[in-house]
Image: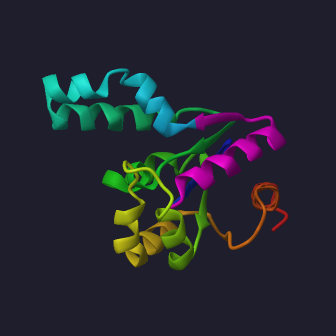
Amino acid sequence: MKSNIVIVGLDYEYNLKVSKSLAELTDLYFLDVKEYINYALFSRSDMLEKCGVEYLEKQETSAIKGCSNFENSIICIPCEYFLKNRMYENFYEGSHIIYLYFSKSKLKKVAETIKENSYLPIDLIVFEDRDLELKNVSNLKICVGNKTIKTVANEIINFVKGKR
């Protein structure tokens, strides 16, 4: 039985808002994978400097795989982690994978307001490939458009409950 809901898409900040709303509406645990990795690898910069990039990536992979073992959770995961090395395969069995889709033009506007350490500018360059891959590995693609966060969250709940 699938007890988790994985939220993925190219606008991570928006995905976090939907995930938090969804967790409140369902009383499920909320897991921000990015924060979890930062917690699990408490000193990423030291690890990178002392152990190298290969070791750091191995530890990140291990932490992400650990997230797939959570139960009764809303899991918000950055696209770059989800797609890297087909990490999504770890979530198939126990999770409903929901792709929150924004058009390329909408994402370009978002990219103008984001922090430097975002992958969104890269995702925009390869938008068509990312969109296709996310669509192919998800159970549901929601075109966000101008929907409210609560509307998107309710759409996810209805899908999980089988009402869609």
Is residue 6 visible in the rendered image? The answer is: no
Whether 85 is among the magenta residues is: no
Along the line of sight, the residue nearer the viewer: 63 or 16: 16
Q: Which residues fall within the magenta stretch?
A: 10-31
Would you place residue 66 above or below residue 151 in this image? above
- Above/below status of 123 relative to 72: below
* Left or right: 49, with 27 as reference point: left
Q: Residue at x 53, y 70 (%)?
A: 109
**Quadrant in the rendering for residue 26:** top right
The picture places residue 76, in percent across and down from the top left corner, at 57, 45
- Res 127 visible: yes
Q: How is the image coloured?
A: rainbow
Judge from the rendering whether residue 79 lies leftward or rightward of residue 106; answer left or right: left
Foreground of the two, 63 or 53:
53
**Position of 152 relative to 22 (above/below):** below
On whether residue 19 falls in the magenta region, the answer is yes
Main secondary-structure element of the magenta-colored stretch: helix
Left or right: where does residue 7 sit relative to residue 29?
left
